[in-house]
C-alpha cells in the first residue's frame, strides 16, 4: 500500500484530488459491476422500476424488478414481461403475458396489466421484449424515482459537492491544529 502511495505521490496531493480519485475508482467498480450484471442477465436493461398501478396488487409503484433475457420459446403464459411499446413511448411497459400465438414461426405475445380490464393493443414481437421479471424487490425503486425529481437531483449534486469539498476543510483544520500544537510545544521551556 505504501509503495502505491509513493508511486501516486499520494501525500503530496490535495484532498480534493484524492477524493476525486476515490470517486473515479468507485464509479468504475459500480459501472463495471453493472456491466457484468447486464451480461449475466442477458439484457441491457436488467433493472426496471414500476411507475404505474397497472399491475396492482402483484406489483406496486416503486417496486424494483430484476429482468432476464429469455429465448422466445422460454417466455411462457402468465410470465411478467417488460417491453417497449410504440403506443406508450415514455417508458417500458410491465405487463403479464396472457396469450401466445406462433404464426409462421413468429412468436406473438399478447399482454395485459393485472389491474387493467382489457388487453394491450396488438401483440408484442420477440424483439419488443426487454426481459422477463425474475425477481421483485419491493419499494427499492423509490430511490430511483426520487433521484429523477428536482429535489433528488439537488440532493445528489449537494452530496457530490460535499464529498469533494469537505475533506479539504477537515484535513486543513487537522493540519492547522497539529501545527498549533507543535508551535506550543516548541515555545515551552525545557525542564532542567
Image: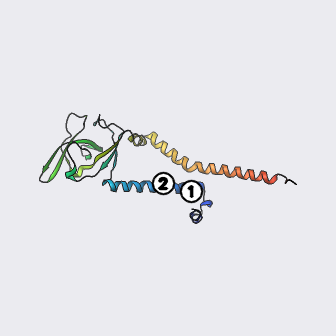
Q: How dense is the environment of label 2, judged by Cα within 10 Å: few (below 14), some, or many (20 and up)?
A: few
Q: From the top left corner, tell me how far across and down residue 59 is, in percent.
A: 31, 38
Q: From the top left corner, tell me how far across and down residue 116 is, in percent.
A: 23, 34
Q: How is the image coloured?
A: rainbow
Q: From the top left corner, tell me how far across and down residue 72 is, in percent.
A: 21, 52
46 displayed left or right of 11: left
Quadrant including the C terminus: bottom right
User: Which residue is outermost to the right?
Assistant: 192
Quadrant including the N terminus: bottom right
User: Which residue is outermost to the left?
Assistant: 104
Q: Nearer the viewer, residue 128 or 135?
A: 135
Sequence-wise, the earlier of marks 2 and 1 is: 1
Number of numbered discs: 2
- Asked if marks 2 and 1 touch (Cβ < 8 Å), the reply is no
- The Cα–Cα distance between marks 2 and 1, rounded to whole angstroms, is 12 Å
Q: How dense is the environment of label 1, judged by Cα within 10 Å: few (below 14), some, or many (20 and up)?
A: some
Location of residue 63 (image quadrant): top left
Q: From the top left corner, tell me how far across and down residue 115 is, in percent.
A: 25, 34
Residue located at (19% from left, 52% from top): 73
19 displayed left or right of 33: right
Residue located at (23% from left, 52% from top): 127
Location of residue 14 (image quadrant): bottom right
Nearer mark to the viewer, of 2 and 1: 2
Residue located at (19% from left, 35% from top): 118
Residue located at (45% from left, 41% from top): 152
Task: Classify mark 1: helix, strand or loop.
Answer: helix
Task: Classify mark 2: helix, strand or loop.
Answer: helix
Mark carried by residue 44: none
Residue occupied by mark 2: 26
Residue occupied by mark 1: 18
Location of residue 97 (image quadrant): top left
Amino acid at each position: 500500500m505504501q509503495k502505491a502511495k509513493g508511486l501516486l505521490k499520494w501525500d503530496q496531493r490535495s484532498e480534493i484530488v484524492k477524493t476525486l480519485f476515490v470517486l473515479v475508482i468507485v464509479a468504475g467498480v459500480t459501472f463495471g459491476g453493472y456491466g457484468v450484471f447486464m451480461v449475466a442477465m442477458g439484457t441491457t436493461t436488467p433493472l426496471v422500476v414500476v411507475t404505474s398501478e397497472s399491475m396492482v396488487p402483484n406489483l406496486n409503484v416503486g417496486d424494483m424488478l430484476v429482468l432476464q433475457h429469455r429465448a422466445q420459446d422460454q417466455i411462457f403464459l402468465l410470465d411478467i414481461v417488460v417491453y417497449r411499446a410504440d403506443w406508450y413511448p415514455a417508458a417500458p411497459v410491465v405487463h403479464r403475458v396472457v396469450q401466445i400465438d406462433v404464426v409462421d414461426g413468429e412468436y406473438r405475445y399478447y399482454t395485459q396489466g393485472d389491474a387493467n380490464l382489457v388487453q394491450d393493443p396488438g401483440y408484442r414481437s420477440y424483439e419488443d421484449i426487454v426481459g422477463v421479471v425474475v425477481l421483485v424487490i419491493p419499494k427499492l425503486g423509490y430511490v430511483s424515482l426520487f433521484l429523477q425529481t428536482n429535489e433528488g437531483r439537488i440532493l445528489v449534486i449537494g452530496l457530490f459537492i460535499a464529498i469533494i469539498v469537505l475533506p479539504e476543510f477537515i484535513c486543513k483544520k487537522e493540519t492547522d491544529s497539529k501545527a498549533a500544537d507543535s508551535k506550543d510545544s516548541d515555545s515551552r521551556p525545557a525542564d532542567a
